[in-house]
Amino acid sequence: MTGQGVAFAVLAAITIISALLVVTIKNIVRSALFLALSFVGVAGLYILLNAEFLAAVQVLIYVGAITVLMLFAIMLTQQIMSAKISQTTEWFWLALPMALAMLATLIFFFAMRTYPVNPAPDALAVGTTMPLAEALLKPYLLPFELASFILLAALVGAIVIAREEKPGATD
Amino acid sequence: MQPINCYLGVSAILFCIGLFGVMTRRNAVGILMSIELMLNAANLNLVAFSAYGPKHGLTGQVFAVFVITIAAAEAAVGLAIVVNLYMNAKHVNVDQVNLMKW
Amino acid sequence: MNDFKNFIPDYRYAVLAPQILLAVLALAVLVVGLFTDRNRKSKLEHYLPPDYLAVCGLVAVLAWQSSMLWRSLKAGEVVQAVKLFPTSPGDPLSPSLMVMDRFAMFFSLIAIGGSVLVGLLSIDYFRKRDFNRGEYYSLLIFATLAITLVAASTDLITIYLSLEFLSLCSYVLAAYLKGDRKSSEAGLKYFLFGAVASAVMLYGMSMLYGVTGSTALSAIFEGLRTAPGDLAATAWLAVVLVLAGLGFKLALVPFHLWAPDTYEGAPTPITAFLSVCSKAAGFAVIVRVLDIGVPLPQNGLGGVDWFSVVAALAAITMTLGNLVAISQRNIKRMLAYSSIAQVGYILIGLLAATKSSMGMPGLMIYVFGYLFMNLGAFTVVIGLSDKTGSDEIESYAGLMSRSPLYAVTLTLFLLSLAGIPPTVGFLGKFYVFGSAIEYGQKLWPLVALALANSVISVYYYFNVVRQMFFMPAASKDRISPSSAIAVALLVSLAGILVFGIYPQPLIDLARWCSVVF
Amino acid sequence: MDSWILTTITFTPLLGTIVLMLIPREKVSAIKWTALLFSLPPLALSIILWFAYDWHKGGMQFTVNAPWIRDIGVYYRMGVDGLSVPMIFLTALLTTLSIIYSWIINERPKEYFWLFLLLATGMFGVFTSLDYFLFYVFWEVGLIPMYFLIGIWGGARREYAAIKFVLYTLVGSVAMLLAILAMYFNVTDPATGRHTFDMMVIAAQKPFAHAHNIQSLIFWALFIGFAIKVPVWPFHTWLPDAHVEAPTAGSVILAGVLLKMGAYGFLRVLLPTLPWASTHYWTAIAILALISIIYGALVAMAQTDLKKLIAYSSVNHMGYVMLGIAAAVSPIAAVNLDNRAVALNGAMLQMFSHGIITGALFLLVGVIYERAHTRNLNEFGGLWARLPLFGSIFITACLASLGLPGMSGFIAELMVFLGTFKASVLFAGLGTIGIVVTAAYLLWTIQRILLGPANPKYEKLLDMDGREILVLTPLVALMLLFGLWPAPILQIINSSSVQIARLFTIGG
């Protein structure tokens, strides 16, 4: 097995096992930490796929921002931190076969198909960061602008919803 | 490099784990985490196709950047809603909001 | 810097003026709101209250959008569509991220018009509750902006982004009544279902990208046509996943589970917005995706048979929506289920449009009319719950003696929803069902089912009518609408009657706008 | 006067509704007079129409043709022939009389008369329109006011009856809509080369002439639409409820006009447009008609509620209409053009005469119910002595209803049976059972109400007042007039009957 193969296997294992832990363990704080680990695994896969910029973004935003945000939310809504209460619904035994069926479908009809792609592109291809920046600021300028508006709206919305109203602040 | 199917397989597994979590998690933050897993699965597809495809080009990566942005916005809004519900109802468990009610 | 000109907005980007105006308006309302919501007695509140600013601004944008559409129509066949943001600049044939065609403008018109009415409905609603109006209206306008972008998007990236834009604004708006537990739950449900749906849709999109190598709808179309047989099932799966995400926006059964609770819990103007404007966005995008993005297999060429999938969704959507609506006691929930059923009917137009020239105009006429009839019904609901404090259907007892205006107009809106002539609801049904008949006998059973459902729907619509006219009133107090509500009411009423009795202009408009690029 | 008369007839009541909206609801008297005022021009014009219609020439006259929805070729097409002229007169007459009778309505009068005028517009529209789209619009417009009339001013179970009426009728009309659309896409107007909703063009083109399966499908869709309205057994179950619960004037309109819309549909749409299917299924129509006749009569006999009795007698009487229609389309070669025309004349005359007779009977029920507050047959007795005027008119109407010679009902039924006899002796024979039973229950009713020992409870009842006499006189006069001298009406309807009959006569 090549070094790349080993790296892939390790990263895939990290990603999948942490993801599994995210959805199964009871303590929601640990769950969030495993989520971060899973994201790191995905970032590693991005590097294997020559997407260094995305890997960096992945670590910064997912691990650095989203997971932390979630931890904050967990802290703010303390009750759910307690490891004692059950974290799963009674849907478990219905969800398991459904998820497995979906998995079988995806593996067979999606992952195991032949795609019109290079079977093995050069592993040491030039970095994609520059062209990515070009793409984002040239043809994809509009979505780029749009994303900024989305972030603004989300920010306004999040603040307005989560902000604690002072009682009697009316008039 | 590994064949693309390996990445797609990881993505499929990740997606289904997310789906499973969405269906079984009781509290809203847990569901949100599972949703993030699903988004990551989709991103992995996009990046993989982008890296392998002769004609796929960079579009997949561009898409993935936007997805990450949206995921951040979504997490912010979602968590705000969760906190808001907690302030009103003192819990964030979806079965207590009678989610599956007709 | 040879390609510098590609950065400079082409003059044709003036077609984005309504979108730019909406963005500016949203920011302006946000800023004004920051000053007025803190201090209700300020001069700014007196001269420029954010709610009136928002409504007037929306009216202005509506006028602008209408004039643009009008100019496009006058230009005849020449300027039907403006391609914006080509994915590879310099190549005129390359697919673009957005197309400002008449179809997009038509749906923008519906979205902006709907927002004007929703804005009118919100004025009293939020003044009474004393909430952050600046943020509310700016989010409403952002959501409207998102719909106009959805309608114009021709690339999976822009579709995903603008749909998420719309969703994020809608989640917040649904949860906007902060002290109200029902509203918070409504927001949470909407958010969770929406986020899952969009993740599923995104996964489907990533698969489509893998199969076809592109995110542009026109390229996906070609890609699916020529995709190797090995990938046929993958493509089908991908389209189904994308449909699941769009089905969420349209509240198709079985992706409708959020709808009743969200409709009941959300602030009523937002319920109206979700049931009309947000659905219009759903229709615009499902039409565009299926019409220009996913070919039906024919003539030995490849494709994805989405026809039977959509037909099955339409059938169960209309049936389940109707059957469950019967037992509802809360009028918002009843309207929620009825709007689920209505989507089922409208989808028939989409199916028929693959062969019948009446299909696409029918769909558009229906959505256009639906704007007036559903918003009209919600106007009455809002006006009444302001006065009676109840959304239960039983609280409508004897309304005729308390407020003939509300009773008669609500009856007309319900008749229109039921598809009784001479209202615009009948015209929409007539076109949609007519197109399905024209399509051929394959769709006849679906039309028969839809008509049977229409009869069922009369039962629960008339249940409200029965309360209003046959039952004795609980109190003798007269109820009269506020001026903002009255304006919205009369506009909606005019909409269902004028276009019902003299429909030719609406039909012409729908025909001119029914070509999708 | 050629082009505006039908429009005026149809829309004058609608104009009245607008005027009514401007009158404050406290001014009850003004409301009533306004309603009456706006019901009179259609009546006057319908009489003029009767005389102005050139029955020698026949065919559609007074036609209007203006584009409405260009996109799908919907026109504002109106016109009348021998079939619709008497129906328009019947509608106008019963509307006016109902409004006069309703002078006693003091509960929410504004809404009541508003709805009545709207109803009138719907009914006129159905009988005048020659465009399927227009026809369907008016068909539905007539439905909604009746829902309110039953639901607000009706009897104890009014809500149930109202919604049942609406749902049944709607089932029929959506089936009809499907059929209309299917026909629309199957015909092309030779003049324009486009699809058309023109009833006459579609009838001339004979859609699905060779696709018998589809023609059958369309036929049954239309059949259900019209049969529910007629109503033919087994689609009749809404009728007793609706009639019993409706206010008197509502019952009059319901029985007098709305039921005729179903039969009108058969004659205007079904027979001319789908002749193959009509002939093919003539036995089915005839058998359903016979069941309606016999079942209606027998069930009527079992009633103790006078209003319900008359309601079931409507099922019975409309059965004759259907029997006449069935006979006229029978494939039996022995039935010649004249036989068919006679059967159709009988059917059409029965439509008209049932309108005035049953209208009168429902009014009489209203008269007695206003006084005694009961409709139970067994509680009455000996009323003739107490109320001689009421008694005489009641007997007249009953005798007309059972088909006594000299009354309009007799001629109609006679013609139906003449036509049927040629087509099938068996059917004609079975039909006469209905006649016998009808005679029995009507005579029995007369006996129970008017004769025998008087119930002391009702000693102080007053005889009919001027308003009631005013309402009933024209109806009784017409029963006698057309019974003794049917030529004026037969001339007119014959011009239409012959046209339809020709379609079904080999070599005709």
Image: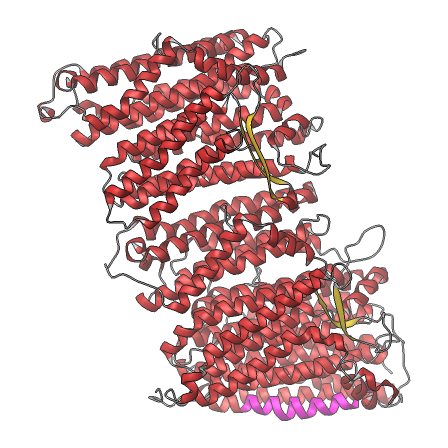
Residue A57 appears in which quarter of the rendering? bottom right
Q: Nearer the viewer, residue D36 or D48?
A: D48
The quarter holding residue D210 reads top right
Q: State the quadrant of the C terminus of chain D.
A: top right
Q: Nearer the viewer, residue C335 or C485?
A: C485
The residue located at (62%, 36%) in the rendering is D197
Q: Is residue C270 visible?
A: no
Q: Position of residue C174 (x, y in %)?
A: 48, 74
Q: As drawn, is D368 to the left or to the right of D262? A: left
D329 shown above or below D31: above
Residue pictured at 36% horizontal, 19% vertical: D297
Q: In percent of the image, x 58 and y 23: which residue is there?
A: D271
Most extreme residue toward the front is: D1
Q: Nearer the viewer, residue D48 or C243?
A: D48
> In the image, is residue D301 above or below residue C101?
above
Q: Describe residue D324's horizontal placement relative to residue C351 as left or right.
A: left
Please provide percent x and percent y for residue D386: 12, 19
Q: Is residue A68 magenta?
A: yes
Is any atom of residue D481 visible in this view? yes
Q: Is residue D110 above or below residue D306?
A: below
Quarter assignment of residue C231? bottom right
Q: Which residues are magenta?
A: A49-71
In this rendered view, identify the residue nearer to me: A54 or C270.
C270
Q: Magenta-highlighted stretch: main secondary structure?
A: helix
Compared with D144, C283 (above or below) is below
Location of residue A75 in the rendering, given as x and y in whole percent from the top left corner: 49, 91
Residue D316: give x, y in percent of width and height: 39, 20
Report the colour scheme: secondary structure
Residue at the spot x=56%, y=86% of the render?
Answer: A155
Q: Inspect the magenta stretch and tell me whether residue D392 lies in it.
A: no
